[in-house]
Image (spheres, rainbow, N blue to C red):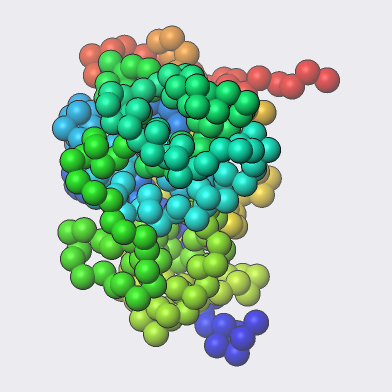
Amino acid sequence: MTKTTASAPVLGTRALNRATLDRQLLLRRSGMSAKAAVGHLLGLQAQNVKPPYHALAARLDGFAPEELSALMADREVVRIVTMRSTIHTHTAEDCLTLRPLVQPARDRELTHFRKGLEGVDLDRLAALARDLVESRPRTMKELREALLVEWPDADPQALAVAARCKLPLVQVTPRGLWGRSGQVALTTAEHWLGRPADPAPSAERRPTDPARPVPTPDATVLRYLAAFGPASVKDMQTWAGLTRLREAFERLRPELRVFRDEHGVELFDLPDAPRPAEDTPAPPRFLPEFDNLLLSHADRTRVVPKEHWGRSWQGNQAYCTLLVDGFLAGVWKLNGDTLVVEPFGRLTRARRQEVEDEGRRMLATLYPGTSYDIRFGTVVQQRAT
């Protein structure tokens, strides 16, 4: 621990929890538009179609799913693989800036498929794949089959992964639209949006136009802290799936506040960012599976108590999550016409009522005009012994 870090103020777990919830629009619902919220949050995890809608329903006042769906139909937001090699819903601007930023992670991902790509010219593959998907959107199956014609001895899955890693491939609509989604079909971000992506990131480039942030590590550090801070270097590296971000934090150090957590880990933050008191009330919130709140820090104890680590998924099955008093406290699912809530511990009568009220609000936001029952029961199936 450096002398500077040793003298930095300590932020306890609850203080970090409240600060992060505030940045994540989860202490109180925001009046932001859906597009502004997607930008502020640096994208929404979108492995499935519904999670981005559930994420915004928990965060925005007056949100209607049709708002996000219209943005997607109008190509103002898109679905694309970015952070941690997972699909995110991003604004068009962030699609064209963040995707180049995480290219080193996509290059690193390709090394796992080296054996299946023996003899494959990756630059030629990228050129062929671009021609294919820009002539018309292609499914992954169509892309694999077309590339196999050129490299019949290669692994088909490796060819498709290589195309996704080398090119910024977006999922075209109707995939992702509320209530009328379709199969995954892909084209390039540049073709879909009608404008080029930003050039490769440069440490020397600094943000100049707030309306379109440039893809420098420095600029993205500031945005990450605004949405997920206070945070350590490892926290941001976990969120982005990148390495070697320490230099960007060090360049920005004179502009940032420095704290430390209860274990002495150095945390950075924007000077004027909100850091509410740790006793600030945090209402219950129903979040989708894989919400970025739970995935964007190396140390997740600011949201996930140690005793609940691993309880929001089982094998390959991820569950929608429930926050109570700001922390992971249960899981939930829609089962027919019933919202089933499984708390991890006993809820007081008052807490139980708060959870029910929040559940009704979530259902009214996303499924207006539909009648649902709310039941406290079992969501996670017990493993066979």
344 or 300, nearer to the observer: 300
Q: Is 384 on the left-hand or right-hand side of 54?
A: right
120 or 109, nearer to the observer: 120
The quarter holding residue 168 reads top left
Q: Position of residue 148 (x, y in %)?
A: 52, 23
Q: Compared to 166, does 338 lie above or below?
A: above
Q: Position of residue 16 (x, y in %)?
A: 49, 62
271 or 331, nearer to the observer: 271
**Which residue is rendered at x = 31% and y = 46% of the image?**
95
Q: Is 213 on the left-hand or right-hand side of 253?
A: left
The quarter holding residue 71 reads top left
The image quadrant where one finds the C terminus is top right
Query: Residue reaching furthest bottom?
Result: 3
The image quadrant where one finds the N terminus is bottom right
**Which residue is rendered at x = 36% and y = 81% of the image?**
255
50 or 284, nearer to the observer: 50
Q: Position of residue 129 (x, y in %)?
A: 40, 33
**Which residue is rendered at x = 68% and y = 38% of the image?**
115
Q: Compared to 324, does 377 lie above or below?
A: above
**Which residue is rendered at x = 50% and y = 42% of the image?**
122
Asked if residue 351 can be seen in this view, the reply is no
Q: Position of residue 49 (x, y in %)?
A: 38, 26
Numbered label tally:
0
Asked if residue 227 can be seen in this view, the reply is yes
